[in-house]
Amino acid sequence: MQNIPRIFINEVLEAEKKVPVDKNIIHYLRRVMRTDKCLVFNNGDEYNAVVSDDNISIILKEKTEHIDPSNDLILYFAPIKRIDDLLNMATQMGVSAFQPVITQRTVANHINWARQEKIIIEAAEQSNRNSVPKILTPIKFSDVDFSGMVVADERAGHGREISDSVDGNYKKLLIGPEGGFSPQEFEIMDKNNVRGLSLGKTILRAEVAAVVAIAKVVK
């Protein structure tokens, strides 16, 4: 079966709707993929669609039966230098939203968030999702609501006994920066009963830790 291109359109979707799109999308479908057919998705729904004869719009057809494989996990993370990889892989893992958190050891403070939006859209298109995760406004560590949260706890790599699994249905996961959380931040999380999760005895890069932790938390 031919792989049909999937396109995210930030519009309310309904059958027979004609949606004007950027000329780059038309070029991609017509010239790169050599087709006038595609799948269009947004907000959990997916529709069959075709390029209009005037090469200006995409016309939505019938809704497909494809069920959105996304989950409802919010990934809290400290911005890192390899943020492209983190957001790309976490989107493929199905997270619903990204919450940037500025920690004491955060070093990547100047992020082009518009570029990151494009990365997660492309990752959602590629990974067969029917939705695109939101990027929320960055907040300080001191402003985080720690209720019902799991943290990827790198202290397991330094000999501390921490469980490598979680019981319960957690909706918030926290990943630290390249240099890890500070002792003061761990103290705050411990006081707030944040659930620690071991990712093994080795210290993982933040983007790898995110993927491993998501796989352990999502049921």
Image (cartoon, helix red, strand yellow):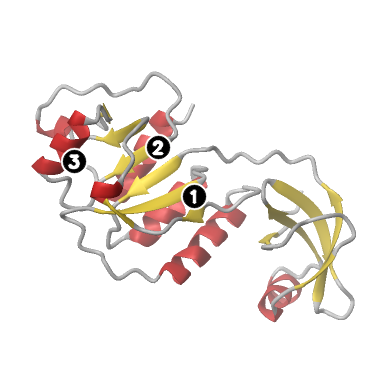
Pointer 2: what residue?
A: 172
Circles 1 and 2: CB distance less than 8 Å?
Answer: no
Q: CA distance from mark 1 to mark 2?
A: 15 Å
Q: Residue at x 35, y 43 (%)?
A: 210
- N-terminal-most mark, 2 or 3: 2
Q: Any mark on residue 203, and which?
A: 3
Quarter occupied by residue 168 = top left
What secondary structure is found at the residue carrying circle 3?
loop
| Residue 124 % position (x, y) | 57, 53
Give the vertical position of 115 relative to 82 (above or below): below
Give the vertical position of 4 relative to 71 (above or below): below
- Residue 79 in the figure: left or right of residue 95: left
Q: Nearer the viewer, mark 2 or mark 3?
A: 2
Q: CA distance from mark 3 to mark 1?
A: 22 Å
Pointer 1: what residue?
A: 91
Q: Residue at x 42, y 34 (%)?
A: 215
| Residue 77 % position (x, y) | 32, 49
Q: Residue at x 27, y 36 (%)?
A: 152
